[in-house]
Amino acid sequence: MPFVVVTTDHTRRGVFAGDLISHEGDVVVLENAQQCVYWSRETRGVVGLASWGPKNGSRIGPPAPRLTLDGVTSVMECSPEAQDAWKKQPWS
């Protein structure tokens, strides 16, 4: 199961990360899913969340056991560094 960052369309405006269970069309199922409420400038955008993870000043919520998302616009596989950063659940 790859750890991924998922973005959703403009009506949902969500950025989430977790273990990818399934991806069919614009529907993704994640386990241990977290939401990025805010990423800091230091993170350098949404792709930075997959590259090195949330940096200081970001806000990452606690994980839900399972989450189904529709309206998915992107799925980005995370680096090991990014996965570790997400699991720290920074909130500042």
Image: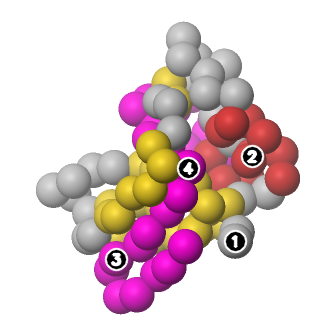
Q: Nearer the viewer, residue 8 or 33?
A: 33
Direction bottom: furthest residue: 25
The residue tagged 1 is 1
- Residue depicted at x 58% and y 69%: 20
How far separated are the C-alphas under marks 3 and 2?
A: 23 Å
Label 2 Cα crowd, 10 Å radius (few <14 / some 14-19 / many 20+): many
Q: Which of the two discs, 2 and 4, sits closer to the camera?
A: 4
Q: Is residue 71 left or right of residue 61?
A: left
Q: Secondary structure at mark 4?
A: strand
Answer with mark 1 or mark 3, whichever residue precedes in sequence.
1
- Residue depicted at x 33% and y 64%: 69
Answer with mark 2 or mark 1, whichever residue precedes in sequence.
1
Whether tag 2 and tag 4 are in contact, CB under 8 A, the answer is: no
Q: Which mark is residue 32?
A: 4
The residue tagged 3 is 27
How far separated are the C-alphas under marks 1 and 3?
A: 16 Å
The residue tagged 2 is 82
Residue flagged by tag 4: what amino acid is it? Answer: Asn
Residue flagged by tag 1: what amino acid is it? Answer: Met
Q: Which of the two discs, 3 and 2, sits closer to the camera?
A: 3
Q: Secondary structure at mark 3?
A: strand
